[in-house]
Image (cartoon, rainbow, N blue to C red):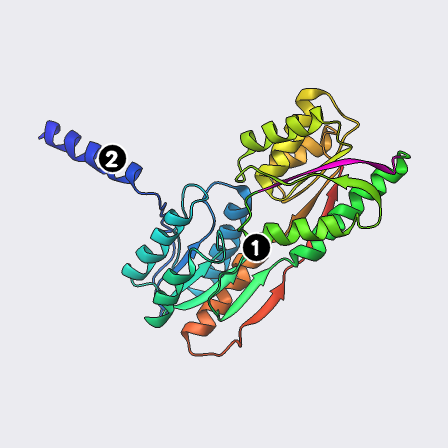
Amino acid sequence: MKKLTAILCAACLMLTAMTGCAKKDNPSQSGGSGGMIALITMDSIDQHWITLNEGAQKAAGELGVNVQFMSPNTKDDAQQIECVNNAVSAGAKAIIVAANGPDAISSALKEAKDKGVKIVYVDSPANVEAEATFSTDNKAAGKTAGEEMKKALDAKGVTSGKIGIINVNAATDSCVAREEGFRSAFEGSGFELLETQYGEGDAAKSQSIAENYITQGVEGIFGCNEGSTTGAGNAIKATGKADIIGVGFDKSDAIQGLIDDGCLLATMAQNPDVMGYEGVKAAVKAINGESLGGAVTDTGVSVLTK
């Protein structure tokens, strides 16, 4: 019997490892009167998404609904689509989603919507009409990041030079908008903004990119998300180039530590807890038949410095 139990446990572990979609149960939540709500973010690891889930669970507790965090283990379109399909199969009444990119996931969301599942976007939308969207005005926030860097460079008497940009990929709308806003802050200046390099939101890959930028003699580096920002700060720290101005996006313990150490100037701290909290409230309203009109709500940013 012990041998059979061990075999069954091993099989369960193999199945868990094989699936790309991580489901985190919240046993304290009942199913509620509205049915299960699925929360699908770009991954289940970045602190940004963990905080978003915490906001969602707070709303779930207040409203007595069951919100399942069913996100991929890493940023991957196929895994995110799998999560959407799994949510529909599990009987989700609503899907709250931060799209990894606007195109790849859209067909799966359209099929879910055609089956009566309510769609709410948080952070990043796809190309399917949703009940509501809760996100940062990324272009405006990116411009603020650029202005913070430019201000710091001006204070040093630096009015020209190269600037490196590390983004996630060319498809994630939120990060693309941040880059556009950042670049707009330097229009008409004497600075050369280098060709964007993509690190897939991975801190280690982003650090390598940042180190390459540093060898090119950049005056500043901009990271478009948590992993990009952490990588940029780690590169500045590892190379001892504290005179390079690092500015980024998102808030995490690692990023705050790099700011405290003087390896990053600032980060644009979003409010993912607000996205998650308001996203659940909107999903429940939609499930209960209330029309939200596709409203887009800016959840804001704060400039976090030492």
Asked whether residue 208 is drawn in magenta, I would say: no
**Residue density around tag 1, few if under 14, some if 14–19, many if 20 or more, within 10 Å:** some
Circle 2: element type: helix
Give the class, few, some or many, for how many residues have Cα within 10 Å of label 2's Cα (few <14, many ≥20). Answer: few
The tag on residue 3 is none
Q: Is residue 165 magenta?
A: yes
The residues bearing labels 2 and 1 have C-alpha atoms spaced at a distance of 34 Å
Depth check: give the residue in front, 179 or 257.
179
Query: Residue 13's spot in the image, x, y percent?
Result: 26, 35
Instruction: Give percent across and percent down for residue 56.
Output: 49, 57
Q: Are marks 2 and 1 in contact (CB under 8 Å)?
A: no
SS label for mark 1: helix
Q: Quadrant location of residue 257?
A: top right
| On-image quarter of the N terminus | top left
Foreground tag (2 vs 1): 1
Which residue is the site of mark 1?
A: 173
Residue name at image x 72 percent, y 32 percent = 260
**Residue 57 x/y as whole percent:** 47, 55
Dot 1 amino acid type: Asp
The residue range painted magenta reads: 158-167
* Residue in the picture at 50% in, 46% down: 50
Residue 22 percent coordinates (x, y): 36, 45
Residue corresponding to mark 2: 14
Q: Which of 77 and 217 is in front in this view?
A: 217
Which residue lies most toward the left here? 1
User: Residue, x 37% and y 53% (percent of image)?
Assistant: 81
Q: In this view, does 140 lie above or below 166?
A: below
Quadrant assignment, res 233: top right
Q: Mark 2 or mark 1: which comes first in sequence? A: 2
Is residue 129 something one can see in this rendering? yes
Q: Would you say residue 65 is visible in this rendering? A: no
